[in-house]
Image (cartoon, rainbow, N blue to C red):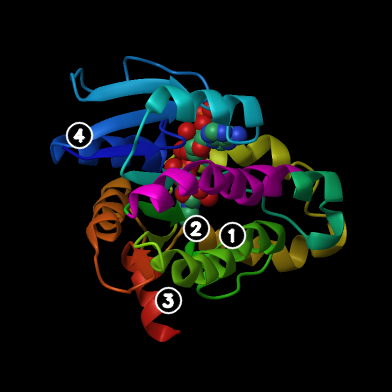
């Protein structure tokens, strides 16, 4: 029976990815900054571990407690929306600490065991913002695009050890806690001069032609984790697939 460790399982895509792998009969290590036993169905194949991907001690403790794993899903992430000139570098660093350095740290924590066993898969959840540029999302896009580049390079490097590395690029899901969790970060990031430009963009964002669901992402992460081809990129959700097809 295979074991997957997933980051950021307290809500949204991560919670549904954990549910999906459990339903497929896998052993699931669902990690959360603050573990909650009431979110996932009780199962002897489920373990909850505390993990904050920005804290080296937390990563080391979680990886030690997890034991050998077959798949790592780097899902944890935070968002920020706003005019670039108004986004402080402290804010940019905060976003990169989770979305970029957190993913790097998690990969460095599992690669040695995967390389030694000549097996293992890493699935990095980025975003459809890496498929086509969007205004007012520059810092978030930068944090995710760095992972796109890193993952492409690593896919070649780790193929030498039979370790696979995949990218899942979800579209916009209004139903996760993503916007709510980012709400405090975006205060004051649309200065007066940008209001006429930003207004129509936010209005269009509130009425998207197509969206992504948690189930879309969970199924595509599952597909990527089980994909034995050299395919790197997996768009998830109707809006993301449309962007990928147009790219
Ligand atoms: N929703 C969208 O429209 C969208 C679109 C494309 C890509 N994505 C990406 O999809 C992933 C999941 O997002 P979501 O929409 O499911 O949002 P969400 O509901 O806010 O879930 C994000 C998860 O990440 C966790 N997290 C945040 N910082 C963390 C840290 N330092 N260490 C460990 N866990 C941390 C959160 O935990 P806490 O509960 O502890 O905060 C939460 O479990 C993210 O990488 C996001 O960038 C989202």
| Viewer-side label of 2, 3 | 2
Say left or right for 45 vs 104. left
Marks 4/3: CA–CA distance: 30 Å
Q: Is mark 1 within 8 Å of ligand 1?
A: yes
In the image, 223 versus 246, the foreground residue is: 223
* Element type at mark 4: helix
Residue picked out by circle 4: 22
Marks 1/4: CA–CA distance: 27 Å
Q: Is mark 2 within 8 Å of ligand 1?
A: yes
Kindly indicate whether the residue at mark 1 contacts the one at mark 2 (C-beta within 8 angstroms): yes
- First of labels 2, 3 by sequence position: 2
Residue 176: image location, x then y, percent: 42, 41
Report the disc number at residue 126: 2
Q: Where does the magenta region start and end?
A: 94-118
Q: Is mark 4 within 8 Å of ligand 1?
A: no
The residue positioned 39% from the left and 38% from the top of the image is: 6
State the quadrant of the C terminus: bottom left
Marks 2/1: CA–CA distance: 5 Å
The residue positioned 19% from the left and 37% from the top of the image is: 26
State the quadrant of the N terminus: top left
């Amino acid at each position: 029976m295979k074991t997957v460790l997933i980051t950021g399982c307290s809500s949204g895509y991560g919670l549904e990815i954990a549910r999906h792998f459990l339903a497929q009969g896998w052993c699931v290590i669902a990690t959360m900054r603050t573990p909650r036993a009431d979110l996932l169905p009780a199962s002897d194949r489920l373990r909850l571990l505390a993990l904050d991907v920005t804290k080296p001690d937390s990563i080391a403790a979680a990886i030690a407690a997890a034991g050998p794993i077959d798949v790592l899903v780097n899902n944890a992430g935070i968002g920020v929306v706003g005019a670039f000139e108004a986004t402080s570098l402290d804010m940019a660093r905060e976003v990169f600490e989770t979305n970029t350095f957190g993913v790097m740290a998690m990969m460095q924590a599992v690669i040695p065991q995967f390389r030694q066993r000549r097996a293992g898969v890493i699935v990095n959840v980025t975003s459809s913002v890496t498929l086509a540029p969007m205004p007012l999302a520059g810092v978030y896009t930068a944090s995710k695009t760095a992972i796109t580049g890193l993952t492409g390079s690593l896919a070649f490097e780790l193929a030498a050890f039979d370790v696979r590395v995949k990218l899942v690029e979800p579209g916009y899901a209004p139903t996760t806690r993503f916007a709510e969790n980012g709400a405090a970060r975006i205060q004051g990031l649309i200065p007066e001069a940008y209001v006429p430009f930003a207004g129509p963009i936010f209005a269009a964002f509130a009425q998207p032609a197509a969206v992504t669901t948690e189930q879309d992402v969970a199924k595509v992460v599952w597909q990527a984790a089980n994909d034995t081809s050299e395919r790197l990129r997996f768009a998830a959700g109707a809006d993301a697939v449309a962007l990928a097809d147009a790219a």
